[in-house]
Image (tube, rainbow, N blue to C red):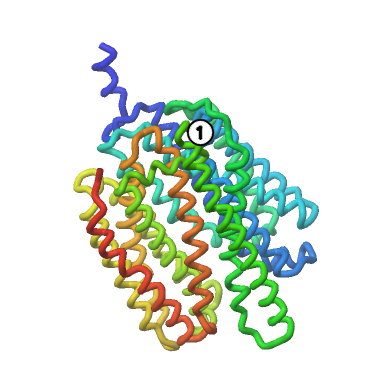
Amino acid sequence: MAATAMPRAATAGTGLTPEANRGIWVLLVAAFIATLNETTMGVAIPHLIGDLGITALTAQWLTTAFMLTMAVIIPITGFLIRRFTTRAMFIAAMSMFSLGTLVGLLAPGFPVLLVGRVIQASGTAIMMPLLMTTLMTVVPAHARGRMMGRVAVVISLAPALGPALSGLILDTLGWRWIFGVVLPIALLVLLVGARWVRNHGERTRAPIDPLSVVLSAFGFGGLVYGLSQIGGAANRGTSAADAAAATTATVSLCVALGIGGLALGLFLWRQVVLQREDRALLDLRVFRSGNFSLAIVQMGVLCMAFFGVFTVLPLYMQGVLGASPLETGLVMLPGPLLMCALGPLVGRIYDTHGTRVLLIPGTILAVGTMWFHTTFTATTSLWVIVGSQLVLCLGLALSFTPLYTTALASLSPKLYSYGSAVVGTTQQVSGAAGIAVLITVMPAITAEGTRTAFVLAAIMSTPLLVGAVLIRKP
């Protein structure tokens, strides 16, 4: 009788019980709030410079420190999710995010505000890997695509809404309310999640390896910080101040990349040793799956081109076409909204028809749009850019959900958490690399300079056409 009652208790179409479905929705909302917060601070920097009496370079650390914290913590989430229960990880993540938000709201000056951002980022870094791991553990294979489509909504919509929401708050309430509006929502999600989120998956009792934590922090943190300095090192200003800033950035770049590369090599060697005893901080056996490895490479290259182009386009529109910040934001918004709307539909198509029916046309659209960007001139209409962005985001919508789902579904259940950590790390590092590379090859914010960046993005993305054919649904 119990066996026959379970299907009736399950949510229609997904095979989830109401309790599991509620838990996933809580995780989705929590991940959305955390991801939304990731992009709100950039718009507030001009206000903070005046209110806190700091320089633009100092204020930029509010976004740089957030990015660095994410890069340091995400690689170790695979181990933490296996070591501690789902509910404990959720409570820890949302508690840190809420505490960081409170610190930011009450910060009397820049140092405390920076600490608040770091605490926020510590909670944010855990949420997306925790969501993906829980989803892969709980959701039956036949429904994973549609559930991962909901994750795609978080990934695409939250970063797009962040700057717009931040601008609205800044114009009406002031920068502190960027934290004040989010805090009660975060606390409500924490209270609801503490009741509704259930524990899933097996636990490991292996102790954490302190040396791996240190090597991971210096390795991934060093690489991301070094990449973030490439734009400053490539500063082509003619003044003495510009030259001094470029020299400082170049030294920081070389030191950070050198330390990061060495520490990352030692970190990878350490994980190979520890995984023999099932004690790895980041289990590299995930790469024994050729399908997982190919999907990760495809995802990394796509993120490099995607984040790079989405960084260069606003510079091009404002510096070459003379568009206002508001016009730029409106041009960039429809594409992510389209990705959000298509997420659930793409997931259903994946569940029914598999990977290639989505990934091949999606990659063709994305790569084709990258090449179309190389035709932009000093007189290109903003409406043309709106159209190209919609086509590009359509291609990305058809690509990301199959890649996420296929990559994790190619692993055994005990490796889901490590696979989720690799996915998150790939997004962070490749996104930073794409931005750095395209900004560096752009000789100036001119039509010719941006065309050079677009050509490189198109060349980088072209091999994805081959990968789209090779990746298959497990």
Dot 1: element:
loop
For the point 36% across and 43% down, the residue is 408
Residue shown at the point (31%, 40%) measured from the top left: 144
Q: Which residue is painted at 43% across and 32% down in the image?
A: 22
Residue 43, relative to residue 155: is it above or below? below
Q: Give coordinates of residue 29: x percent, y percent.
A: 48, 42
Callout count: 1
The answer, for residue 11, to whether it is visible in the render is: yes
Q: Residue 246 at what x, y percent from top left?
A: 66, 77
The answer to whether 265 appears left or right of 367 in the picture is right
Residue 165 at least partly seen:
no
Residue 291 shown left or right of residue 101 in the figure:
left
Asked whether, in this view, residue 36 is left or right of residue 25, the answer is right
Q: Quadrant of residue 260?
A: bottom right
Q: For this rendering, which residue is in front, 395 or 380?
A: 395
Q: Amino acid at mark 1?
A: Arg
Residue at the extreme top of the image, as rendered: 1
**Mark 1 sits on what residue?**
279
The C terminus sits in image quarter: top left
What percent of the width, then of the height, locates residue 259?
A: 62, 58
Quarter holding the N terminus is: top left
Left or right of residue 23: residue 401: left
